[in-house]
Image (spheres, helix red, strand yellow):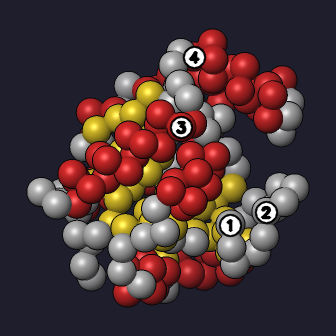
Amino acid sequence: MDISRVLVFSGPSGVGKDTLLLAWYKLNPNVNRVVTYTTRSPRENEKDNVDYYFVDTKFFEESIDKNYFFEYKNVYGNYYGTSFKSIEETVSKGGITILKIDVQGAIDCFKKYPDLKGIFIAPPSLEELEKRLFLRGTENKESMKRRLAKASWEMDQQDFYSTSIVNVTVSDAVQDLDRISMQLLHK
């Protein structure tokens, strides 16, 4: 499988990954995100086969047994994974292939595929991240606490990535994403 056009894209929950990707798609029509699988329920406004392939645990675990996934992890009690087929289909479109995955999954990918490039999206501070998670309105108090504790660990993993971008403003971060992705993919 050709991973030379694939960029791993990750960061803590609430850092603005989806917001940045939406803005980047508008800026650069050559950006294509690999649709990944999850066993969690869709959030408001998420669409099956667009945002994720929403599947049940039985399907996911059977797919693991069949070696269907390029990478997968259980995150916050739900499975998330990327199939080999999804990557190949997205790469075949040409342009930049974005693999938006959890930091744990990204680290596994970097270990298995040392030539894989990655961009870590960081918040300006943990306090700002907490504010963004709160404003997102999808977390209860316990979930918020768990995500912030994990975010601290995730921030310490940035050395696994080719580079990182601090998401202070969407417009600046998207410009950085576009410029840096071109540099990474043309090395």
Instruction: Say if mark 1 contacts mark 3, CB within 8 Å.
Output: no
Label 3 and label 4: CA atoms lie apart by: 21 Å
Q: Which residue is mark 1?
A: 51
Label 4 and label 2: CA atoms lie apart by: 26 Å
Asked if residue 1 can be seen in this view, the reply is yes
The amino acid beneath tag 3 is Ser
Q: Which residue is mark 4?
A: 126
Instruction: Say if mark 3 contacts mark 2, CB within 8 Å.
Output: no
Where in the figure is residue 153, as x and y percent of width and height?
A: 46, 26
Quadrant where the N terminus is found in the figure: bottom left
The amino acid beneath tag 1 is Asp
Q: Which residue is mark 2?
A: 46
User: 144 and 6: which one is in front?
Assistant: 6
Q: Is residue 32 above or below residue 121?
A: below
Label 1 and label 3: CA atoms lie apart by: 22 Å
Disc on the earlier residue, 3 or 4: 4
